[in-house]
Image: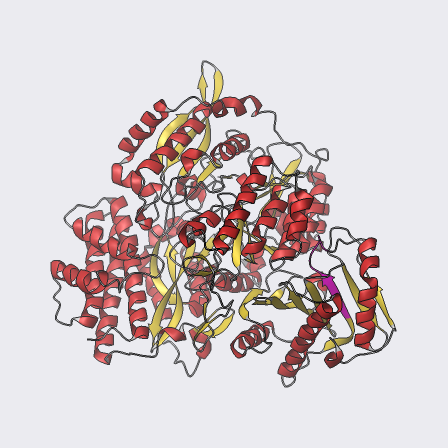
Amino acid sequence: MELQQVNVKIFVDGELTVPSERLIEVFHNWIREKAVGDLLIDVADYRHVPKGPSVLLVGDEADFCMDQTGGRWGLLYNRKARLDGTNDQRLSQAFAAAAKACNLLEAEFTAEGPLRFSRHEFEIVINDRALATNTDETFEACKDDLEMFVTRTLGHREYTFQRDTDPRRRFGVAVKSAKSFELSTLG
Amino acid sequence: MKASNEIWKERLAGQLPPDLAEEIDTFETEINLRRQGKVDEKIFAETRLRRGVYGQRYDNGQRHDGVKSRQLAFDGERQTKGPNTIWDAPGMMRIKIPYGGMNPEQLEVLAELAEEYSDSIAHITTRQDFQLHFIHIDNTPTLMRRLAAVGITTREACGNSVRNVTGCPFAGVCPDEAFDVTPYANALTQFLLGHPDAQNFGRKFKPTFSGCVQHSCGLTAMHDLGLTATTREVDGKTERGFKVYVGGGLGTVPRQAKLFDDFMSPAEILPVAQAIARVFGKYGEKKTRSRARLKFLIESWGLEKFKEEVLAERARLREDPQWTEFLANVDSCEESPLHPPGEMPAINGNQRLAHWISTNVLQQRQEGYVTATVSLPLGDLTADQLRSLADIVRQFTNGTIRTTVEQNFVIRWVSKADVVDLYHALDAVGLSEPGASNIMDIVACPGTDTCKLGISSSRGLAAELRKRLAEKSFQLDEAIQNLHIKVSGCFNSCGQHHIADIGFYGVSRTVQGFKVPHFQVVLGGQWEENAGSYGLPIVAIPSKRIPDALERITQHFMDNREPDERFTNYVQRIGKGPIRQFLEELTQDLPAHENDPGFYSDWADPRQYGIGDIGKGECAGEVVTHYQFEMAGAERMIFGAQILLDGGNAKEAGQQAYDAMIRAAKAIVQIQYDDVTSDPDEVIEEFKERFFDTELFHDPYAGPKFADYLFAAYENAGHTHNAESAHHLIEESQLFVEAVHSCYNRLRSEGVEAN
């Protein structure tokens, strides 16, 4: 099974205390400084919509978002463009990009107050219902790929997968690790 | 391109209406042909527009990042999907929702599409459409297939075509309507969609239906074709019919629609619409886009000649059974409730719930039932909210929900007994915002967020105003709560600023050598009575001071209104002069850039506003000073013209508006030729030679439109103005002045203005 359009959300640890205006500013700086490598286009402000994408950095091949979907803040990386390679390579690419963005944000806000991303939890979503319908069959078909990737990335097997099985939702797994991990090891 | 596009094509094969399936296949082929360079980019642009595939800001590959304009390196080949429109640049997709009618399955599919192809946000427009942003053109055929599978088309959502047929979202349940216009709106939609007689327009054509005269739900006065339901008694029997209006529209040059027929039989509405389409297609302007709407044809011909041509065309039409087939079923398509009628339960001191009921819940014509408006901030909601809304609509109704022109939803056929439960269900998913259709419910076009034409951040301003109003919403007097605010990012009026109590539209000004986002304050418009009158701009204020301007206007209204006086009447009684006076203070004592750089950026956008447009080639200080002095004079004259018009002196008002245009033209001419006199003949000659023939004055998007206003005014200089023509000229002179400002700023940036 081919996993494309990989989304990775790394949750914020605790509450988001950073002023949202500053996030907009930082994302604009990323565009100017080409901070994450990809072609970035613009910043969309959705702070008026509850539990949504909040502050979105729109890119050509991928978007970055300080996202509150589901009621939890996190940095969401949404790969839009198709990627060649294996599932493991595509998962790795998405994680690396998300982790890099998290590291940049943590560094950016060190002086102003805490912005810390979780070292225990993240989420993987396949943003394509045709490639990955949200069924047990899909989970079975890609479980090995997911486990191989997560085990290698975390360096252990002490984690759990959790799924929202509502068939209307996109296929994804929430990963909870018993041991903390470093953002730099992801991907 | 998504890997799954082929999967969807196979999966949905045979499930789509054949005509839509063929249409989408054809579009896919056209995409491929364009990719191979076998279709001209202009033709392809119109082709995709007619399928709802629109451009978006920065799709020309240029973006100002706050320091300088930079190229966005989308791809090496620079393949285009239209003039100056890069293939890989994300675009917008407009999705037609005729008369706003939807069902839960459609909401769910929109949620899926928003997640998989867009940014998880769906946006409702002021014409009851949906828009999804940041979409790659290669994925659009798949979106169209998935929409078609639930009965939605994007065909003719944009381009020079018959746009979405809008309609009152309360049709069929409104206590004040003459009758339910839904089946008629549906019939016109089906009839005109792809009709051969509606494919040859110079511009778009917007129809609408309203169930009554007094409310604003259909906005018939601002549409190309507006039909308002009415009845009459003949031999003791009630007959249905429509008041038919033509030639209305907002845009840069707003026009009130004119009454074409006081009572048109339902059997005639389709053939007459067809005849109007044929006349518009045959005689409407094609070359000059700025004069290509139906309103200009009617203005040029006069209503009587237009009517004669349409009726003659109508007489020549070959009989079509579609004209009347639908009439047999107009009473059989009524909606039904899910739950029995009931009584409203006790609220038990829940203040927010009580507020929501007072603003968002309306009694239906049918006893025991209400409608509930789901008020959306800036017309946006998330994919999760769309799915939740689908569940809620299923739980409380038989799937009866419509979008509105105020960028909201209306849930219909809610049993009164369910109102409190409905509120709690909506509240749980962040959809219980009170204040529907009042001052909190601010309408805004996309503006600089995503629109290529945006000048100032309309959504940024609207969000800021909402935030500030929300903090004191419970303390606001009812007279303030009932005001309508509408914001456009430019003069094109997609945010409908002309018909608000308080409207704003984006302009830019240069202050101390830096560009500063501004908004013109528009007063005198009327939302009620189907957009009963249009306002005019009175003063341009820096964007960051607009919240203060709103505070001053509302406070002055509260302090000076007479008992039960409405805002429109207050503006008329007080006059715009005193209002401008207390607003004008906000244009003075502006902070220096080094002291407050944030003043020189727009709302929710920290980039220096337009810094790339200035810097090089500054002309001599004296000339700038003189230019600014002259332009300020021209703007004062335009405002003076408004005061004259408000005082009933249309003749002088028209003359003063014309003089203001000449003065502004002279100001820009003097940048190159300091010795020009004030003689209009000389000003026009010099302006034409130096700025028009050289295309220096041409707007990057609108071309020669604004210069044409000047030339038209010059040609008609000897004419005596009536109230309507003076109003139009004031509008055009204000736009011309804005164009002079834009031209001046462009020239400064390019360093070509000085001799």
Residue at the farthest bottom position? A111
Location of residue B178 in the rendering, given as x and y in whole percent from the top left corner: 50, 29
Q: How many marks?
A: 0
Residue B540 horizontal side relative to residue A122, left or right: left
| Structure colour scheme | secondary structure
Locate residue B271 relative to residue B707 in the image: left or right: right
Q: Residue B371's x, y, as percent? A: 62, 41
Relative to B413, residue B613 above or below: below
Residue furthest out toward the right? A158
- Answer yes or no: is residue B351 visible: no
Q: Nearer the viewer, residue B72 or B257?
A: B72
Picture quarter with the C terminus of chain B: bottom left
For the record, the magenta segment spans A122-131
Q: Is residue B146 above or below residue A176?
A: above
User: Would you place residue A177 above or below residue B684 in this image?
Assistant: below
**In the depicted view, which residue is nearer to us: B752 or B367?**
B752
Where residue B162 sits, quadrant-wise, is top left
Q: Is residue B131 magenta?
A: no
Residue B180: give x, y in percent of width and height: 54, 31
- Snapshot quadrant of residue B516: bottom left
**Foreground: B124 or B318?**
B318
List the single residue furthest toward the top: B235
- Asked if one can make out residue B557 in the rendered structure from this viewpoint, the answer is yes
A147 displayed left or right of B119: right
The answer to whether residue B153 is left or right of residue B600 is: right
Q: Choose between B594 and B578: the one closer to the eye.
A: B594
Percent x, y of residue B114: 62, 55
Residue at (59, 76) in percent of width and height: A37
Q: Quadrant of the N terminus of chain B?
A: bottom right
